Amino acid sequence: MTATTFDPQAGYIVTASTAFVNFNDQTFATFYQPILGPVAFSLFYTFRARLIPKPTISNRTMQSELLAHINAGGQQVIEALHRLEAVGLVQTYFQSDEVGDVYVYELQPTLTPEKFLTDNLLSILLLEEIGETAFNHLIEQSRQYKLASSNVNLTNISHRFFEEFHINSQSITATPKAITDARKQSPIEKQPSLTAGMETDFNWGTLLHLLANQPIVSSDLENSHELILLEHQLYGIDEPTMKKLVLRSIDLQTNHFNPQKFKQIVASTYNVIYTQPSKVAEQKSPVANDGLTSRDRQLLKTAADYSPVEFLQDLKAQTGGYVTSGERHILTGLVEQEKLTKEAINILTWYVIGDRGHSTLTANFVDTIANNWLQNGVSTGQQALLQLKNFNKQSQEKKKEAKKPHRNNWRKTIKEPMPEWSKKDKSELMKKASSQEVAKLRERIANRKKK
């Protein structure tokens, strides 16, 4: 179950994996915080402050307490939680019992700076967020205590385990019961890969064929398989273009492929200001049988031909804008979920930037549309476009209805007989009473007082 809304009435419990002892605050602040944002950063430390020894399901607390502590809305908190899950810092579990719904948030440790830099997803996202200068500074900072000299020839003379310690050979072949019991109680935890389940139409064999006669160490390509596929997924890079980018990332002295240099080349290549004419068609024509015009069909064809990032870049070309790191993060999240097709994601982008005229994609607005589509069974580009046309039609009908004058047909007209004095002429009503009429009126008043 994937939570798309934050339920303040549900319970929650915070636990931590056994590896959480390796969590490092400095790494979290310098490497993770720039890509998480302030709300997610605050949410994680809020979770951490609620860790208790040996937690049980009965230790649940209302999630409304989280909203009050973080001072943020439910939509902000759920987006922050999703970001923590996406970078592998929180694993979320759910169950519904006789008490109600309950979520278990299991905290995970940070990666070491070196492992963070070798992780393709996290390092690319960080590079795009903070820029190359700050990124290189972080690398230098994380390696500040390593030996800087390069012209040394050191030999590792460290002692091995069995040179210093002696263990009963029977205990090695037959593990003691106390150890096997402990392992059963707490099995080794393995964090899921951030790229698990990501599909791609990239032909790896074609790339290898194109690079077959090039001066590159073939084993380096296999080791960077995931990184290359990820960059293709984000930017829609085809095999011939990928070949050029890979060749630019080779160390000419050693012929080794440099993953860090590759990330920087791709980021700089696809993070430029585009000013060429947009590839999105602007033609108009009569409506077809399925409710789509030829312009709509051309838009669908264009949406199918380009990757989400390239499609957004073409839309930004109309105003001379560029794709921000935040927008790439939003598109990456939609691609990773694998719930909307590439065409549907591009139609969503066109609606926000091209139709609504927004200057950038914003997470709240995009998530609202995407969730609405999924709830209505929309997943393809054609379904998305029809959903938008139907929404626009309903909006126009509501506006027309609002402009119509409202009549209170429910209000009945009540007719009552008019008093005799109201039928008299105004001059007659203003006529001065005679002395006899005044005497009669005084007599009538005096008789009432006696009663």
Image (cartoon, rainbow, N blue to C red):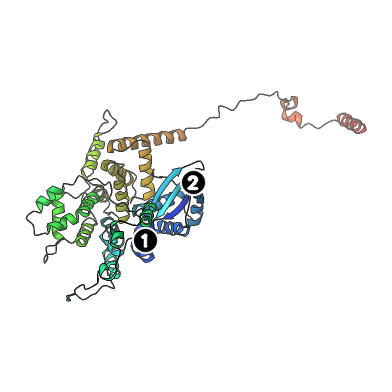
Where's the C terminus, which quadrant? top right
Q: Is residue 115 left or right of residue 203?
A: right
Query: Residue 76, can we see it?
Result: no
- Which three-letter amino acid code belongs to the residue tagged 2? Ala
The residue singled out by tag 2 in the image is 10
Q: Is residue 278 left or right of residue 7?
A: left
Asked if the residue under mark 2 is in contact with the one under mark 1, i.e. CB atoms within 8 Å, the reply is: no
| 10 Å crowding of disc 2: few (<14), some (14-19), many (20+) | some
Taking the spot 29% from the left edge, 73% from the top edge, the residue there is 145
Foreground residue among 384 and 264: 264
The nearer-to-camera label among 1 and 2 is 2
The residue singled out by tag 1 in the image is 33
Taking the spot 26% from the left edge, 29% from the top edge, the residue there is 288
Q: Secondary structure at mark 1?
A: helix
Query: Nearer the N terminus, badge 1 or badge 2?
Result: 2
Taking the spot 34% from the left edge, 52% from the top edge, the residue there is 86
Q: Is residue 418 left or right of residue 153?
A: right
> In the picture, residue 250 is in which quadrant?
bottom left
Across and down, in percent, residue 172 comes to: 29, 59
Foreground residue among 135 and 140: 140
User: Relative to 161, does residue 109 appear above or below in the rendering?
Assistant: above
Alpha carbon separation for disc pair 1 and 2: 28 Å
Across and down, in percent, residue 216 comes to: 11, 59
Across and down, in percent, residue 371 comes to: 37, 42
Tag of residue 255: none
